[in-house]
Image: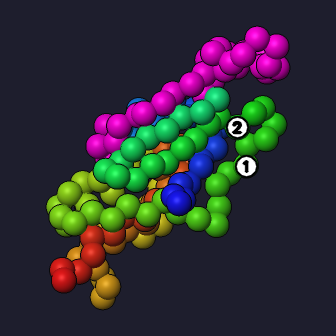
Amino acid sequence: MQINPYLFYNGNCEAAFKFYEKVVGGKIDAMLTHEGAPAGMPIPPGWTKKIMHAKISIDDEVIMASDAPPGHFHQPQGFSVSLQVEDPTDAERKFKALSEGGSVNMPFGKTFFSRGFGMCVDQFGIPWMVNCPMEG
């Protein structure tokens, strides 16, 4: 069994996944638009290029997502995507990249439980926690 987060975006899923591909080293495995939907499937006006389903792999982990249908998007709350990075320098670089254009809830820095930890919301509205665990 595998558990994967499924994120909903406000029409900017493609841009978000391309951003994650660049800043955290992910690989986009799927990016399906409504344009490729079966004939007869209802598509909201102007949504042929919006994402119906996307999948990105980051190391051996998977995040899936889509653009929420018009009128169904809600700002994410009550969760964070947690990124565990072994190297503190790399963790801080990824945190800074993820927070650029977004907001920082807790600046990246050493804590009692990690060599580096920070919390942010990216420019697409997705909350992230970046952690560099203690050695050993």
Residue extending furthest bottom?
A: 112
The region drawn magenta spans 22-51
Q: Looking at the figure, which quarter contains the C terminus?
A: bottom left
Q: Position of residue 125 (x, y in %)?
A: 56, 49
Magenta span has 85? no
For mark 2, what is the residue? 68
How far is mark 1 from mark 2, CA to CA?
A: 9 Å
Which amino acid, by three-letter code, is at mark 2? Ala
Q: Is residue 18 left or right of residue 43?
A: left
Which amino acid, by three-letter code, is at mark 1? His
Magenta span has 28? yes
Are the residues at dot 1 and dot 2 in contact (C-beta closer than 8 Å)?
yes
For mark 1, what is the residue? 74
Q: Secondary structure at mark 2?
A: loop
Residue extending furthest top?
A: 39
Q: Position of residue 114 (x, y in %)?
A: 28, 79
